[in-house]
Image: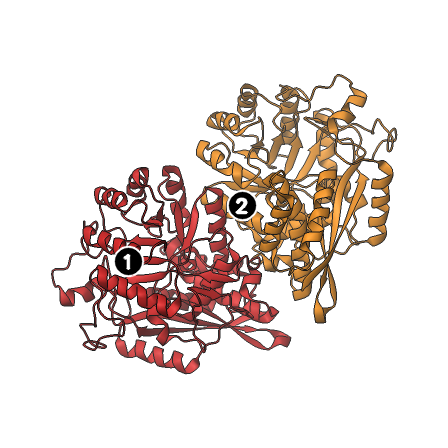
Chain colours: A orange, B red
Amino acid sequence: MKISDLVITPLAFADPPLLNSTGVHEPLALRTVVQLVVDGASAGEVVGLGEGSGERDVLDRLELVRAAIIGQSVFDTGAIELIVNAVLGPDVTPIQKRAVFSIVEVACLDAQGKLLGVPVTDLLGGAVRHTVPYSAYLFYKWAAHPAAPGGGSPDQWGEALDPAGIVAQACRMIDLHGFRSLKLKGGVFHPEDEIAAIRALAVAFPGMPLRIDPNGAWSVKTSKYVAGELAGVLEYLEDPTLTTAAMAEVAQVASMPLATNMCVISPETVPEAVRLDAVQIVLSDHHYWGGLRHTRELGAICDTFGLGMSMHSNSHLGISLAAMTHVAAATPNLAYACDTHYPWNSADDVITTPFAFVDGALAVPAGPGLGVELDQDRLAELNKRYVDSGRTTRADTAYMRLVDPLYDPMLPRF
Amino acid sequence: MKISDLVITPLAFADPPLLNSTGVHEPLALRTVVQLVVDGASAGEVVGLGEGSGERDVLDRLELVRAAIIGQSVFDTGAIELIVNAVLGPDVTPIQKRAVFSIVEVACLDAQGKLLGVPVTDLLGGAVRHTVPYSAYLFYKWAAHPAAPGGGSPDQWGEALDPAGIVAQACRMIDLHGFRSLKLKGGVFHPEDEIAAIRALAVAFPGMPLRIDPNGAWSVKTSKYVAGELAGVLEYLEDPTLTTAAMAEVAQVASMPLATNMCVISPETVPEAVRLDAVQIVLSDHHYWGGLRHTRELGAICDTFGLGMSMHSNSHLGISLAAMTHVAAATPNLAYACDTHYPWNSADDVITTPFAFVDGALAVPAGPGLGVELDQDRLAELNKRYVDSGRTTRADTAYMRLVDPLYDPMLPRF
C-alpha cells in the first residue's frame, strides 16, 4: 500500500465576473488536481484524487512534497503530514503547509477507500447524515467579463447589481438546485444597498435562512449598524469586519451569531477567538485546516467551546465537492448548510459525472473512496487552458483595475 | 457489514492491595469485555473486541445499547454514538454515556480493521510512532490482602510503605519491563513522606522523569508547598488538588507543569481549564473520552490550546492496552509516556498473548484491528470469578474500612 507517484496537474476553468470586497473574479479560476498513485499489491494500482489551490506556490510545494512521500504507506497520513511539514521547512507557514497537505490527505483517503472498498465517510466515523445541505451562493456580478478570454459575451446568469438582480439570481439558483438557504457575498456596494438586497431576499423568500458576507469590508461601527438593521433577518453575519478583536466588538452588540472564515483560519487562531468570544460560528474548510480528519477535529473544538459550524468555499470543482460532502456527512455538529461555488463552475468539472443538487442538498457519494472519477480528457483540456493562459496566481484586484484603474482594495471600505 | 450481536461479559481479575487517596484496591478488580459480532458478508462473521468498566451501571447500560445497535453498519460509529446517547437518555450524564460508547467504539474499530485487513492505527491516520512508551506505575502497597479471597498470602511485589519500599518496587518494575519514567500514586501518606519517596527515586534513578499523583488529596496550600519542595525534581505534578479553580491557584506558583485526569475529564470541562490556565498537561483516557477517535480529537484540542498530552489508566487488561497503544501511536502530540496498571494485572489477561514491554515500551500491534485475540477459556474463568464474587462495583473505601474502620476518604486529606 505504498505511494508510488503523485501526479500534479494545474488547471484553469471558466469563472463568471463575480464581485467581492477585493475586486472581481477573473475569466479563469485556477486549481490543482493531484492523482496519488498507490501500489495496492493484490488490489493492483489504485489512484487517489485530491484538489486544491492552483496558486503557483502551492504547485511548487506539491512538487517538493511529491519526492518525499513516495514509498510511504498511504494509510500513514499522520506521518505524511510530518514529512510535508519537514520538507516545506520553517519559511513556509503552518497555514501554507496545511493548504498543501490537505490536497494530499484527501487523495490518501480516496485511495484508502478504494483499496478497502468503503466510502471516505466510513474512514471518518461514518455518516451521521445521508444528504448534505448547501446554501445558494449569491454574488453581485456583471453581465459579462470585460477582458479576454471570455470578454464581451454575457454569461447565462446576467447582471446582478441591485436588490432586484440579486433576487432574480436567487430565484434562478433555487429553480436550478432547490437551495433552502441563501448567502450573499457583500462588501461590494454601500452597506445600505446590501441591506436593501438582504431585505428584498427576505421579502421574496419568507422564512428562508439568509446570510451576508462582506469579507471584512466594514468598520466596526458600520458592522454594528448593519447588525442592528438586519436584526431578526439574518441567520448569521459572516466576517463583517477584519481581525478577531474587531469581530469581538461587533459580537457584543449583534443580535445574530457572527460567523467567520477570516479570523479563525487555523488552530493557531482559535484561542484568541475563544478568549474574546469573538465569533459564534466557524466556517470550516478542509483545504485550509489540513484535510478531512483535521476538519473533524475542528468540529470537536467547536463543540467543546460551544461554537457552531458551517463550511466555507472557494471556487472549486467536483473532487473538492466530494471531499466537502463526505466530511460534512461525518461531522455531527456541522449543522449549517455549507457554502459552495459549484453552481458557478460545474460546467467545467473534471469528474465524469458532475454533482447535481436535489432540494439544495447532495447525497453522500457511495464510494469507494470519494466516489468520483476523473475525466482525463477534460483534465488535459483544462490543463492546456492553464498553460495557454500564462496565469499562475489569482488577482481579483488587478483584474478590477482593468475596468476601474483607481480601484482601492484597502479594507475596511465602508 | 451490519452488527448482529454484542456479547457482554463482566469479569473479575486479581488485583494487589494498592493504596490510593480513597482507600485500597480490592482483591478483585472488575471489568467488562464485549464481543461485537458483525456479519461481514463475503468476509464471514467478524468479532470486534472492546473492554471497559465492570461497574454494574455500565453493564446495565451496555445491555440497553445492545438492542439498539444491532443492524447498524459497524462503520457508522458517529451514528452509533447518537444512538447510544438517545437510548441512555437525559438521566445518564454525557460522561457516563461516553464510558459506554467507548467500549462499543473500540469494538467497532477492531471489527473494521479485521474486515479491512488493517490495524486500528491505520483507521486513525496511521502511526506516527511505532513503539509507545509507558511509565512505571508505582504504588504504596501492603504485602498481602487483609480479606478473602486472596487474603493472607503475600503477593510477589511485597510491601511498599516508605521510600525504600518504593525504590525497591521501581527497581523491580524497571528490571521486569525496562520503564524509563516513574509515576508514584500518592495521597496516601503525609506529604513529607511522599516528598521523601520522590527524592529517593531521584537519587536512585538520576535523570529519570518522575511524576506524583495524589488524586486531589492535598489542599491548595499543601500543593503549593509540595510543588516548591519538588521543583526541579518532577517531570509533572498530577492532580495535587481537587477542582479546576484550585488547580489554577497551584499552577500560578508551581515551576513544573500540572497534569490532570480529574479536573479535565470531558469536553464540558475543557473551557474552564483553558480560561483559568489551570493545567498544562491533560491525561487522555479513551474510556472516558468516548473512544479512540474522540481521543485523537482531544489531542487536537490540546494542541490548539498549547496543552501537553499524556494518558491515564485504571486497572485494565490487554484489550484496553491494545486500544491505548493504537491511539497513542496515532496521536502526534501524545508525547509523554503513558500510564498503565498492566504490570499489576497482566497475569490474569484475557488475550491469548499478553503484552510484553521492551525498554518500557510496546510495539504497536500489527493488526488486523487491535491485533489481539480473546482467550475464551480465560474469559469464562474470569466471568465465573465475577459471578462467584457477588461483586458489582468498586469500593476502595469500604475495603479499607475492613482494616481501619474510622478511615475517612474526605479530600483534601492533607
Q: Which element type, helix, strand or loop, lies under badge 2? A: helix
Q: Position of residue B97 (x, y in %)?
A: 40, 58
Quarter of the figure with residue A156? top right
Residue kind at label 2, given as amino acid type: Leu
> Could you tell me which residue is drawn at 61 percent across and 57 percent down?
A121
Q: Residues within 10 Å of mark 2 (few under 14, many from 20)?
A: many
Q: Are marks 2 and 1 in contact (CB under 8 Å)?
A: no
What chain letter is assigned to the residue under label 2? Answer: A
Between B131 and B82, which is closer to the camera in this rendering?
A: B131
Question: Is residue A248 placed above or below A88 in the rendered structure?
Answer: above
> Could you tell me which residue is drawn at 64 percent across and 76 percent down?
B42
Q: Is residue A105 left or right of residue B336?
A: right
Q: Is residue B60 visible?
A: no
Outermost residue toward the top in this view? A406
Q: Is residue A267 left or right of residue A187?
A: left
Outermost residue toward the bottom in this view? B377
Location of mark 2 (residue): A298
Distance between the alpha carbons at the discs numbered 2 and 1: 35 Å
> Could you tell me which residue is drawn at 48 percent across and 64 percent down?
B106
Location of mark 1 (residue): B185
Q: Are marks 2 and 1 on the same chain?
A: no
Q: Position of residue B11 (x, y in %)?
A: 35, 74
